[in-house]
Image (cartoon, helix red, strand yellow):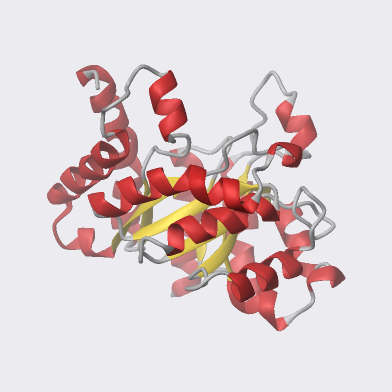
Amino acid sequence: YENVKRVALGNIYREYLDIGREFDLPLLLSTTTWRASRERIDAAGFAGVDVNGDNVRFLHALLKSYGGYAEKVVICGLMSCRGNAYIPGEALAVSEAMQFHSWQAEKLAVAGIDLFLAATLPAISEATGLAFALAATGKPYALSFVVRPEGTLLDGTPLKDAIASIDATVIPRPWAYMVNCTHASFARSALMHETNSSATVRQRVVGLLANTAALSPEELDDSTSLVEEDPESFGNSVAALHRELGLKILGGCCGTDDRHIRSLASQLAKRRK
């Protein structure tokens, strides 16, 4: 809500929009609302301000200068769990999660998003409640988990079982599932692990937003410095998952910036030729 910071945020978004346009790739553009629950908005002193809606309108305004390319951009309403995404013990129960997240989900839906992404989810209970809240809006939605190389969510639930449970419980079911806040090597191990050897995982997991650090959540949570991976290595390893596992939505999470996304976009564009 300060002009200097709005300009800075717009410049960051334009870096990614320009990369997408340069390589003629569709782009999932997420709102900066990962932690914009009513609880956190009130605590930040913005009670009564439509923070979620303003984020959506900000992105719509940015797209006006991108002409025909704007048709390839999907505006995504970003949400997450209430507590620490690396501590599954803080996850809400199903009913609590549905009640807690419904307010933000409705704010984003009314503002005109194309798709919901509930990301960095460590536990099946809160993911299920979040799914109920998102399903109630009538908008398509995807759920994205933090996973371990052993093929489980952080709460120990096998990814395969989490997907099957939510798909069978929530109507309409998620449009798709993803993995995020996980290094590409960890994600590959999780998806290839015998625990997840099923058609369900292959069909329902469509993307990865990867970290640059090959560290466990516990190591990352206690880290006092940014662990980076060079952009070329990042681009190669993430793009390889498109070829190996058919993942269609690929991008970056912690530790990445425009250099990493440019490298990834370049690799994907080459594979398309």
Quadrant containing the N terminus in the rendered view: top left
User: Residue 215, percent across and down?
Assistant: 77, 38
Which residue is found at the position 47% from the left and 54% from the top? Answer: 117
> Image quadrant of residue 166?
bottom right
Q: Work out whether residue 246 can be spotted.
A: no
Q: Residue at x 39, y 37 (%)?
A: 32
Q: Position of residue 13 (x, y in %)?
A: 32, 40
Foreground residue among 9 and 162: 162
Q: Nearer the viewer, residue 65 or 220?
A: 220
Answer above or below: position of 118 versus 246: above
On the image, which quarter does residue 81 sit in? top right
In the picture shown, does residue 190 fall above or below 148? below
Residue closest to the eye, 264 or 47: 47
Tell me: 51 left or right of 43: left
User: Where is residue 223 shown, x and y percent of the image?
Assistant: 72, 23
Residue 229 at x, y = what percent? 64, 38
